[in-house]
């Protein structure tokens, strides 16, 4: 399995446990990295994904709620919610991963870990978001700046 795909899988495991049990994400990440024997570049990428996703969590949840209104966030499958968060971080917040790659990787995670309908759901939500990346990036970064300003005060 490719390094970045393994890192995304580890990230999903970390976010899932964090979402369900509220264990410290750094501890979960270290445990999951040790269990998966991931190389240094994969571990760095997983760490970047976990930290980035958690730092933009509130803003990404607003986007998910807006673009998947038929599925309230608290009723959405935990796996689906976290797959969406990882992909949105990758192509909206960090801009490091090409949009098509992030969507494809998210769909692959959904095929492996989600329900039968999860891949289609994930693809649909992310496809809609992908059409508006510049506006969504501005919104997400502005929300993040406001949070950082409030935290600094």
Image (tube, rainbow, N blue to C red):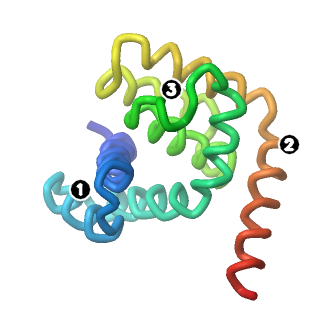
Disc nearer the start of the sequence (2/3): 3
Give the left or right position of residue 32, taking residue 3 as reference. left
**Front: mark 2 or 3:** 2
Q: Nearer the viewer, residue 16 or 91?
A: 16
| Residue 102: quarter of image | top right
Q: State the residue lying farthest toward the bottom.
A: 153
Q: Residue at 26% across / 70% down in the picture?
A: 27
Q: Nearer the viewer, residue 41 or 71?
A: 71
- The residue carrying pointer 2 sits among few (fewer than 14), some (14 to 19) or many (20 or more) residues within 10 Å by Cα, namely few
Q: Can residue 105 be seen?
A: no
Q: Nearer the viewer, residue 72 or 127?
A: 72
Q: Position of residue 99 (x, y in %)?
A: 64, 34
SS class of the residue under badge 1?
Answer: loop
Quadrant occupied by the C terminus: bottom right
SS class of the residue under badge 3?
Answer: helix
Q: CA distance from mark 1 to mark 2?
A: 35 Å
Q: State the residue lying farthest toward the left.
A: 35
* Location of mark 3 (residue): 104
Whether residue 117 is situated above or below residue 126 in the rendered picture: above
* Location of mark 2 (residue): 135
Q: Position of residue 56 (x, y in %)?
A: 61, 58
Q: Residue at 41% across / 30% down in the picture?
A: 77
Q: Which mark is residue 38?
A: 1
Q: Residue at 52% across / 18% down in the picture?
A: 121
Give the left or right position of residue 56, taking residue 132 as reference. left
- The residue carrying pointer 1 sits among few (fewer than 14), some (14 to 19) or many (20 or more) residues within 10 Å by Cα, namely some
Count of numbered labels shown in the rendering: 3
Quadrant occupied by the N terminus: top left
């Amino acid at each position: 399995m490719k390094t970045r795909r393994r890192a995304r899988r580890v990230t999903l495991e970390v976010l899932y446990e964090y979402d369900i049990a509220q264990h410290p994400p750094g501890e979960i990440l270290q445990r999951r990295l040790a269990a998966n024997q991931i190389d240094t570049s994969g571990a760095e990428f997983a760490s970047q994904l976990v930290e980035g996703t958690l730092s933009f969590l509130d803003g990404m949840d607003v986007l998910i709620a807006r673009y998947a209104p038929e599925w309230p966030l608290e009723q959405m499958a935990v796996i689906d919610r976290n797959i969406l968060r990882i992909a949105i971080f990758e192509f909206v917040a960090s801009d490091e991963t090409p949009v098509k790659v992030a969507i494809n990787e998210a769909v692959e995670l959904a095929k492996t870990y989600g329900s039968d309908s999860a891949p289609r759901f994930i693809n649909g939500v992310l496809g809609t978001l992908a059409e508006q990346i510049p506006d969504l990036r501005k919104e997400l970064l502005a929300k993040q700046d406001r949070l950082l300003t409030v935290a600094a005060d």
